[in-house]
Amino acid sequence: MLNLGLTGFFACLILLGLKRPFIWVLCYLYVDIVAPQIISWGFLTQLPTSLIAFSAAFLGWLVFDDKSDSRFTWRQGLMGVLLLYCAITTLRADYPVEALTKWSWVWKALVFAMFLPLTLRTRLRIEAVALVMVLSASALIIDGGLKTAMGGSGYGTLRIFVDNNTGLYEGSIISCVAIALIPVAVWLAKYGTIFPSDWRVWLFTAALIFACSLIPIGTQARTGLVCLGILAGLYLRTAKHRVALSAGMALAVVIATPFLPQSFLARMNTIEDHQSDQSAGTRIGVWKWTMGYAKDHPFGGGFEVYLSSKVAYDTVSTSRTGSNVTITRTPIIETGRAFHSSYFEMLGEQGYPGFALWLLLQISGLVQMEMIRRRWKDRQESHEAWAAPLAVALQLAQVVYMIGSLFVGIAFQPFILMLIGLQCGLWSYLKRIDRPAARQRFAPRPMRVPGEAAG
Amino acid sequence: MVDILALAISHGLLLLAAWRLVWRPDLDSEGPDLNARKRRGPGTPMRVNRAAAGESTGESDGDA
């Protein structure tokens, strides 16, 4: 039944694409985010869904779409340079076989992120991409949120559809992405035209935001909690009703705390007391190792180079018996531990040049969105008022991602690269539609001369 | 059961969104002068005509 439903859904999207080829681009977004071939167990698992959707999206654009308004922005070029650089480091990787496995999905994610902005020629297309990204991720978020509310959660034990730890199905990644999506979901509820703003849209958005906030609790990923805190702070910074909003947030925390599982509170306490936590100790150890590795290998060791990492550290735990305090140090040596940070992932795998390229890609996104916000914030007409808030939403999403990236290795997470593609599309679209207005304002006015002369 | 519910809600909305998109003409083209047209109020004559009117009556529309 499930298999039939998912296959039917995929077939519907492909068929609708025959009428409007842009639907195929949306179909690829859906396939890449939800990965229906993982959830399904029959026919769909035999089909190369991702390949079919990408081929349809690319050929649909190449053959049927009007390309006169497509622009190639410099950030797309930057992704191209990063792609080439990664190809070179993969060729001379320390672990060639493992590196090729990661390369096999990284290049697809980068190529799609470069391709996506070329198709975003209209405001509706930009909105459609944002909507499909939110709704696709909502499948995982609603599932995880409901299970958390019903008590089926725990670190590494929250089962979203299937027991799988790849892509968005990994706890830390989905909790970071779920929080990053909140601003985009709010923008869609306010300015959406596919589902125009009404009480049903707001009800769904409120429920989705609640589910998003439950994901860090369900997965017990501390990263998500940090992201949620940062996002709340950023919202308070710009909110009109600051006092009411902060009171509401405080009330939500007070109400929610007694219902949180004990294991969650115990794990969150380790954010402060990280010395007793093995996971935090490993991270700091691996980060030190990475800095040393980058000094010896400034051009990086290729994908999955963390396999050669060796980390030695002590965990310190304190126990009190009456007035006696016992401090126990346990020496731990670990090898082949993952980076647990996108910044160190880039530094170790791609060296200083790759790290600089990636950082430039991220920071330029923040700057571009800020530039759009400043340029468009005073435009109140209905066909322009949506632009600045979308730029702010995409900027907030990226800030959340960059904070989450401090603790999770998601440098090439396809979902985030899609967000970057969306930013490029928005930038290029607004630049294009802004130009006729600018030309009107500054152009010479030969037609007025006879009128003025007569008057 | 929860899985089915989550999939049904999200996929139902996705399908509805795709269906609505198929029937929206502005998905593929917004028209070359969408902005210009929207800025001009309904019934406002074209600039060329206004200039011509100004010429015949000797009036200026003030923003020249």
Image (cartoon, coloured by chain):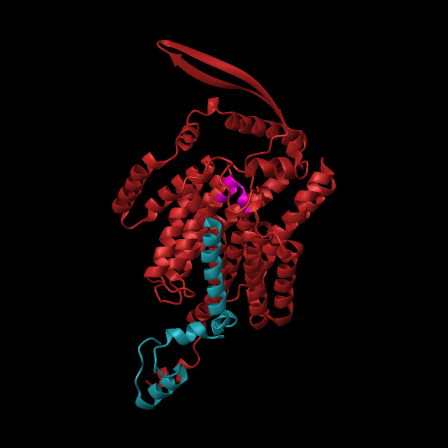
Chain colours: A red, B cyan
Q: Which residues are magenta?
A: A168-174
Measured as percent of width and height from the top left, residue A323 is found at: 35, 9
Q: Quadrant of the C terminus of chain A?
A: bottom left
Measured as percent of width and height from the top left, residue A427 is found at: 50, 58
The residue lying at 47 percent from left, 22 percent from top is A276
The residue lying at 42 percent from left, 42 percent from top is A148
Is residue A184 or residue A56 the one in the foreground? A56
Is residue A332 or residue A439 the one in the foreground? A332
Does the magenta-highlighted stretch encompass residue A382? no
Asked whether residue A320 is in view, the answer is yes
Does the magenta-highlighted stretch encompass residue A171? yes
Q: Quadrant of the N terminus of chain A?
A: bottom right
Picture quadrant of residue A63 = bottom right
Is residue A34 or residue A378 the one in the foreground? A34
Measured as percent of width and height from the top left, residue A413 is found at: 56, 46
Picture layout, residue A11 above or below residue A177 = below
Picture quadrant of residue A384 = bottom left
Measured as percent of width and height from the top left, residue B10 is found at: 47, 56
The residue lying at 44 percent from left, 50 percent from top is A142
Picture layout, residue A310 above or below residue A443 = above
